[in-house]
Image (tube, helix red, strand yellow):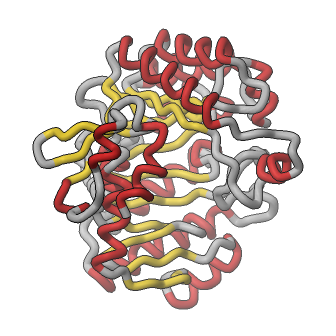
């Protein structure tokens, strides 16, 4: 089972981020973590959910939890047999939220992978993004994790940020490569509703330029593949054997359980989203053991459509059996994809258009 835990706390709210999050305020973090463990226990008792093969701590900023709280959470999940010695544990981290001592604690608690939300190594870009770390802190964070013995380090980068030049983006890519992580994610900024960035887009202060997006995507592809990274998903590159097992589970349509406020679960073709409110989440867990809302039963057609959208993003490609009757000749003729065995695999020119191509196939 793939398990995701949503930690909603952030020191500051980034203007581009649409995930449910808030500053800690007066939230009782011990009560919150107790609720997460209680929710996990509920699903073990109710559905006999097996231990997590992968556990992903996302947010928010999981790394801002105190050492005591991190220990409490992971020890609690082990106590109810959610984690084993073979579980892959990935944690998102902000470079400004940990020291060497805390990084060593991550490893002692069994963390096998840290995904660093760096986004950029350019000071002006970080200021635009509202990030609280400097380029120097970002690079130092990688060194601290390496010194602490974290087996796998992933760096998150973002492109098409307002004011970011192509030279800025190339600098970010080159710096990330020089730090020798096992994994790099290169995300195209998207303008999500209910964010300050979306408001500026609709007001005409910012613009979304598809041609620029494609240009910066190709720069990432060229730089990272030349450096020996395998491009295994639209936005993700890894050294051989260091792909994200947790995320591959999503892309391959595996079941997953989400714990915490706003977390989504899909199990046995049933999907639900937890209440996106930390205080109400804690109250409901205490009352009934779960925080389910927005429950839906997924049909075979629903699942097929999702598999098309997810499979197209991967290097494995889309099984042709999922698109029988669809017109793929135009996609092939345009050079956006090739046939590899019984799968349709997007080319470098097709990958920036993955969403449009998926829509064409539905």
Quadrant, the N terminus:
bottom left
Left or right relative to 77: residue 143: right
Question: Residue 289, can we see it?
Answer: yes
**Vertically, is 108 above or below 140?**
below
Which residue occupies 38% across, 72% down? 266
Question: Residue 44, can we see it?
Answer: no
Give the image location of residue 31, x and y in percent.
63, 69
Which residue occupies 31% across, 61% down? 307
Residue 189, image quadrant: top right
Give the image location of residue 5, x and y in percent.
49, 59
Quadrant, the C terminus:
bottom left
Q: Which of 300 and 291 is in front in this view?
A: 300
Which residue occupies 54% across, 17% down? 173
Give the image location of residue 8, x and y in percent.
64, 58
Q: Nearer the viewer, residue 99 or 138?
A: 138
Which residue occupies 31% across, 38% down? 333
**Vertically, is 21 above or below 345?**
below
Left or right relative to 64: residue 11: right
**Vertically, is 15 above or below 296?**
above
**Vertically, is 263 above or below 336?**
below
Q: Which of 167 and 64 is in front in this view?
A: 167
Give the image location of residue 320, x and y in percent.
19, 55
């Amino acid at each position: 089972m793939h398990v995701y835990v949503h930690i909603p706390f952030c020191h500051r709210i980034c203007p581009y981020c649409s995930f449910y999050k808030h500053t800690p305020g007066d939230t009782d973090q011990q009560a919150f973590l107790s609720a997460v463990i209680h929710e996990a226990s509920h699903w073990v008792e109710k559905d006999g959910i097996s231990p997590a093969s992968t556990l992903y701590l996302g947010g928010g900023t999981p790394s801002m939890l105190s050492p005591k709280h991190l220990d409490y959470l992971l020890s609690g999940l082990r106590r109810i047999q959610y984690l084993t010695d073979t579980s892959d544990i990935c944690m998102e981290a902000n470079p400004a939220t940990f020291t060497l001592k805390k990084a060593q604690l991550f490893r002692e608690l069994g963390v096998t992978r840290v995904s660093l939300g760096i986004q950029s190594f350019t000071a002006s870009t970080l200021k635009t993004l509202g990030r609280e770390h400097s380029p120097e802190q970002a690079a130092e964070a990688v060194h601290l994790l390496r010194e602490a013995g974290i087996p796998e380090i992933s760096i998150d980068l973002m492109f098409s940020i307002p004011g970011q030049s192509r030279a800025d983006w190339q600098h970010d890519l080159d710096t990330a490569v020089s730090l020798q992580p096992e994994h790099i994610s290169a995300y195209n900024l998207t303008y999500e509703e209910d964010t300050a960035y979306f408001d500026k887009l609709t007001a005409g202060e910012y613009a979304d330029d598809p041609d620029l997006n494609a240009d910066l995507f190709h720069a990432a592809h060229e730089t990272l593949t030349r450096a020996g990274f395998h491009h295994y998903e639209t936005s993700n590159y890894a050294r051989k054997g260091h792909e994200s097992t947790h995320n591959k589970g999503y892309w391959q349509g595996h079941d997953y359980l989400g714990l915490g406020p706003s977390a989504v679960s899909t199990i046995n073709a049933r999907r639900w989203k937890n209440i996106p409110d930390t205080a109400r989440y804690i109250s409901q867990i205490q009352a009934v053991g779960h925080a389910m809302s927005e429950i839906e039963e997924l049909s075979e057609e629903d699942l097929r459509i999702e598999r098309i959208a997810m499979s197209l993003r991967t290097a494995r490609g889309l099984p042709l059996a999922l698109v029988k009757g669809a017109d793929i000749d135009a996609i092939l003729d345009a050079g956006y994809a090739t046939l590899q065995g019984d799968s349709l695999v997007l080319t470098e020119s097709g990958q920036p258009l993955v969403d449009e191509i998926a829509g064409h196939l539905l």
